[in-house]
Image: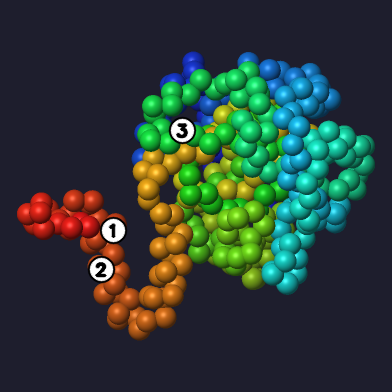
Amino acid sequence: MTTPARKVLETTIPSARSIPFEAVLQGQTPMIFKGLARAWPLVRAGLESPRAAMDYLQANDGGGRLLAYVGQPEIKGRFFYDDSRTAMNFRAERAALSDILQRIEAGFDQADAPSLYIGSTDLDACFPGLAAENDLGLDVETFGPQPPLASIWIGNRTVAAAHYDMSNNIAVCAVGHRRFTLFPPDQVANLYPGPLEPTPGGQVVSLVDFDAPDFDRHPRFRDALAAAQVADLEPGDVLVYPALWWHQVEALDPFNVLVNYWWNAAPAFMDTPMNTLLHGLLSLRDRPDFEKQGWKALFDYYLFGPADQAGAHLPEAARGAL
């Protein structure tokens, strides 16, 4: 892949309470905060050695069997589909943390080591005490009615194919180096999304192999690259980016740990918009174009325009769902 020329904005701030969330979210501007988590014990252990980081994780292990994903050497760390696009090129299994870490460490000197990672594991439930010792110092009132969900990712050299999440993200590169390649939401068509289900990790992924893009099959990917931003993260760096931004994530070292915080300011009672999309596929997509254009105007009026627009001219008692 030709690495996109545009780099994610980097800056330094005194503490996480200084993160300019308004600029990141409303301005649709991902930002890297250099060294913001450098004082974390986990980060310091990783800078000492991969073994020290593993020992630190094991000291905080809750003892449960964790969900791990394992791929053969030939996938080269890219957890993805098999050739049918209906099944995966890896398997999932449950194992103790110590077993997973031993298998990762055994591959340090192997050019053809299996790809292995623990993905999106609840930090508080599975690593009690780790969150308290490695506290970013976030102001929870910033995040609205729901506090951020803290998760941990542990593995060797792996690639998460480009996908989007429905929550905003604070990603802390704790051990090893990572590269995020980010695309704004309007690049969806240029990224050639795969099936809605099944998916490698829960979200739709791009079918483009970023390391060897087939521009004959995926010509619009050139346009996606022109809009892309790259974030190269060192241990202790923190990346913040908005919901629905597509991102490929590469873990670059023999041992890597990421801690992330997902949050969304929407009230807890709100349904996932993905259900709206699925209902739209059933009820709208295959209607005649003139009808779809009419419905688009209605959706723009009722859903995507100002929230008070549709009911502003009505008495309050008559607004109903508006």
Are there few (<14), some (14-19), or many (20+) residues within 10 Å of tag 3? some
Q: Residue at x 52, y 49 (%)?
A: 165
Q: Amino acid at mark 2?
A: Ala
For image coordinates 75% across by 65% down, the residue present is 82
Q: Amino acid at mark 3?
A: Pro
Sooner in the amino-acid sequence: mark 1 or mark 2: 2
Q: Is residue 172 above or below residue 270?
A: above
Q: Nearer the viewer, residue 245 or 119?
A: 119
Q: Which mark is residue 316?
A: none
Q: Residue at x 34, y 80 (%)?
A: 289
Q: How is the image coloured?
A: rainbow
Side of 278 where 86 appears, left or right: right
- Mark 1: amino acid: Leu
Measured Cα–Cα span from mark 3 to mark 1: 26 Å
| Label 1 – label 2 distance at C-alpha | 10 Å
On the image, the x and y values in percent for residue 143 come to 41, 33
Q: Which of the marked residues, 2 or 3, is nearer the chain's N terminus?
A: 3
Give the quadrant of the C terminus. bottom left
Mark 2 highlights which residue? Answer: 297
- On screen, residue 50 versus residue 277, left or right, reads right
Query: Residue 62's quadrant in the figure?
Result: top right
Of tags 2 and 3, the one toward the viewer is: 3
Question: Residue 278, position in %: x, y?
Answer: 46, 67
Is residue 253 shown left or right of residue 123? right
Q: Is the residue under label 1 in contact with that under label 3 (CB below 8 Å)?
A: no
Can residue 281 be seen here?
Answer: yes
Q: Is residue 202 above or below residue 129?
A: below
Residue topped by disc 3: 147
User: Helix or strand or loop: what does disc 2 sit on?
Assistant: helix
Instruction: Give the numbered dot on residue 303.
Output: 1
Q: Position of residue 70 (x, y in %)?
A: 80, 50
Q: Residues within 10 Å of mark 2 (few under 14, many from 20)?
A: few
